[in-house]
Image: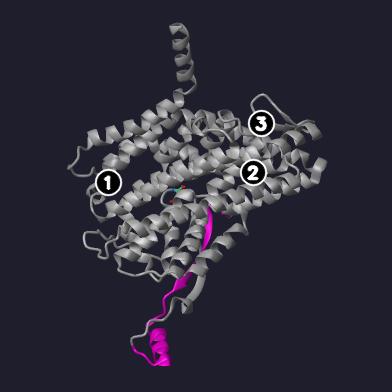
Amino acid sequence: MSGRVVTNIKGCLKTNVLTLLTLAGVFGGVILGIALRPPGSEKWAQRDAMYVGFLGELFLRMLKALILPLIVSSLISAVGNLDLSLSGKIGARAIAYYMVTTVIAVIIGIILVVSIHPGQGNDEGIHKDEASSRDTTTADTLMDLVRNMFPPNLVQAAGFQYQTLLTRPTDEELAAYREKVGNDSAEMPKEMFKISGNYREGSNIIGLVVFAIVFGIVISMMKKQGEILLQFFTAMSEAMMYLTRIVIWLSPVGVCFLIAAKILELESFSVLLGQLGMYFLTVLIGLTVHGFVVLLLLYTLVVRKLPFGFVANIVQPLATAFGTSSSSATLPLTIAALEEKNGVDPRIARFVLPIGATINMDGTALYEAVAAIFIAQVRGVTLGLGQIIAISITATAASIGAAGIPQAGLVTMVMVLDTVGLPAGDVSLILAVDWLLDRFRTTINVLGDSLGAGIVNHLSKRELEKMGAHDGDVIKVENGIEATQM
Ligand code: ASP
């Protein structure tokens, strides 16, 4: 009897060794950080913190190298391997799940921030970093999001995104404007600033996602003629997963040193005790309720199975999301865990997860809504129902527009603030705790993507089985990827 228990425990440890090691990496990172910099002591010099974080930095660089080839090849091969009506159905299910859960997240955030009221109506005690912020309007930010969906140059899209630039008027222009309106202290509205645009650094993932989906659809429509391309991208996506399985072994060490180095270079922890502490707590409660109550309940209701096994199997990507603050960088590990441990069909995982990591960010949506209302509370601005509705809509758009990289939500927040007339520079009010909140919201973003893939997989199971058996073209080969039989 006891022999069997020991064998079971051994078996369990063996299959979950990487998960356990990555969790140990998270806690080890916190302990290492605190041991190297006991509470109350000065922050480390930037260079010394860099040495400590070096291994983590290498891990992150390797993950980042996988993102673009993995997203593009996975999407093309997943969509290309499905027939058109089925990919439409699967896509629609995923988008419906993303929209519903994001809106629920925003509503939870708003209810919490309005009832807890963390911003007391004065900004005393809140450290304000003077960050230089870009002039922008909500319309420009939304239109840039749509523009970026259609990159004019795919090679450029791998490294750059388009952004509209507004130029403030010169003194003469301002004087002419003031004369025209007959008020010598009038400010020119942003809508009248000169418009130009430039490409800033950062991959335009949403543009590549849109292109890859359309390309996959075309290949699937080309049938025989497109087969060679389909095989190429299917093999490419599998090669990326092989690489992922190697890089994955670095995650315990990588996560540990990323977290330790962050603790060493922090300004101070005391901000978590003041007014920002209440804001931090509000977001944290919201994320917990959304991630561990709403999403798990939704999964249980749809799949008709308890979600704990599913979640236990994705602890490794969740811990990596916490360590890296990036859902894009975590994507390879998320796909691997869902396919290999949760048995999600690769045609689903490689289709919906890259889209999810790019546009579905429940944690970010919740935080955007809470943060915008918190800033309004701090500034003593009372918001009417119309403004709160405007915040929910723009927070949803801002979460779709945010890239899956560290603190991207802070950038798109400008749009949410703009809708209620708060200055863009006010994001600096929450800067001090954003690095930590970012880790929690990224974890919930990855959890939302994974549960979504599980739900869509369940809903599409029968159609997928029928398709595999029916058409005989798509077979499952040993390593779990679909391949087209020659
Ligand atoms: N860091 C987040 C992510 O990668 C985005 C954000 O909220 O800043 O999912």
Residue located beneath label 3 in the image: 481
Q: Which residues are magenta?
A: 157-184
Q: Which mark is residue 266?
A: 1
Q: Which of the colour schemes (rainbow, by chain, secondary structure, one colour) is used?
A: one colour
Indicate whether residue 436 is drawn in magenta.
no
The image shows residue 39 at horizontal and vertical percentages of 19, 40
The amino acid marked with disc number 2 is Leu
User: CB of residue at label 2: within 8 Å of ligand 1?
Assistant: no
Q: Is residue 453 above or below residue 17?
A: below
Q: 172 above or below 235?
A: below
Q: Secondary structure at mark 3?
A: loop
Mark 3 vs ligand 1: CB under 8 Å? no
Residue 379, position as x, y percentages in the image = 30, 67
Res 365 visible: no
Tell me which residue sits at (61%, 38%) in the image. 349
319 in relation to 381, above or below = above
| Whole-number angstrom distance, CA of label 3 to CA of label 1 | 43 Å
Disc 2 designates what residue?
75
Q: Give the secondary structure at mark 2.
A: helix
- Does residue 449 appear left or right of residue 478 in this picture? left
Give the residue type that dot 1 points to.
Leu
Question: Label 2 neighbourhood size at 10 Å, few (<14), some (14-19), many (20+)?
Answer: many
Residue 443 left/right relative to 37: right
Sequence-wise first label, 1 or 2: 2
Viewer-closest of 207 and 443: 443
Camera-side residue of 327 and 289: 289
Q: Is residue 183 magenta?
A: yes
Mark 2 or mark 3: whose residue is earlier in sequence: 2
